Image (cartoon, rainbow, N blue to C red):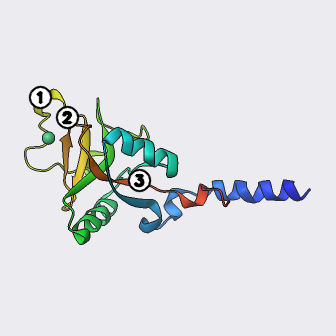
């Protein structure tokens, strides 16, 4: 019976949505340089996924973290082909602003996107090592 009640409590935690998270709860800045693929694996293991940016508020928030730390850019969860978020969500182009001249797909080999400290994106080779943002979801993390 006690176990049954515990299960119900867990279920209600799972039903909370992203929208109830603050921006600080939603994103985790990882200050370790990794390739885009390894960054994705890291995020999916310890958090939810690489960061998905859904609006200007989130983009500005992430840009300010970089700016405050004096960093230039970091990986976000945007890749192709075609451009798609790491969690398979389709891209709303109103929330993604490219740097001037980007994406330029140098040598046809730039399939991952980084965001800079002004909130502008550029495509880059996925094997480049950069710091990155994970999308966190503390509310569905188990409480061990
Ligand atoms: Ca580029």
Question: Regarding mark 1 in the picture, which secondary structure is present there?
Answer: helix
Question: Regarding mark 3 in the picture, which secondary structure is present there?
Answer: strand
Vertical arrangement, residue 138 with respect to residue 98, above or below: below
Where residue 119 sits: x, y (%)? Answer: 22, 58
Question: Where does label 3 land, which residue?
Answer: 134
Residue 110 image label: 2
Residue 73 image label: none
Residue 107 image label: 1
Where residue 105 sits: x, y (%)? Answer: 14, 34
Q: Residue shown at 21%/37% (left/top)?
A: 125
Q: Quadrant of residue 112?
A: top left
C-alpha distance separating marks 2 and 1: 8 Å
Task: Using a 10 Å C-alpha cutoff, classify the residue at mark 3 as few (fewer than 14 neighbours), some (14 to 19) or many (20 or more).
Answer: many
Q: Residue shown at 40%/43% (left/top)?
A: 40
Where residue 120 sits: x, y (%)? Answer: 19, 54
- Do the residues under discs 2 and 1 have CB atoms within 8 angstroms? yes
Q: Residue shown at 25%/43% (left/top)?
A: 113
Q: Would residue 131 appear left or right of 143 to someone viewing this image?
A: left
């Amino acid at each position: 019976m006690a176990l049954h009640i515990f299960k119900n409590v867990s279920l209600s935690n799972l039903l909370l949505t992203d929208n109830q998270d603050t921006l600080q709860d939603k994103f985790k800045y990882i200050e370790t340089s990794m390739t885009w693929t390894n960054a994705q694996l890291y995020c999916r293991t310890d958090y939810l996924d690489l960061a998905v940016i859904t609006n200007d508020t989130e983009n500005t928030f992430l840009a300010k973290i970089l700016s405050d730390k004096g960093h230039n850019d970091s990986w976000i969860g945007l890749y192709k082909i075609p451009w798609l978020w790491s969690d398979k969500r389709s891209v709303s182009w109103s929330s993604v602003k490219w740097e001037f001249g980007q994406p330029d797909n140098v040598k046809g080999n730039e399939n991952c996107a980084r965001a800079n400290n002004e909130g502008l994106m550029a495509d880059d080779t996925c094997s480049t090592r950069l710091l990155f943002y994970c999308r966190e979801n503390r509310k569905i993390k188990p409480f061990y």
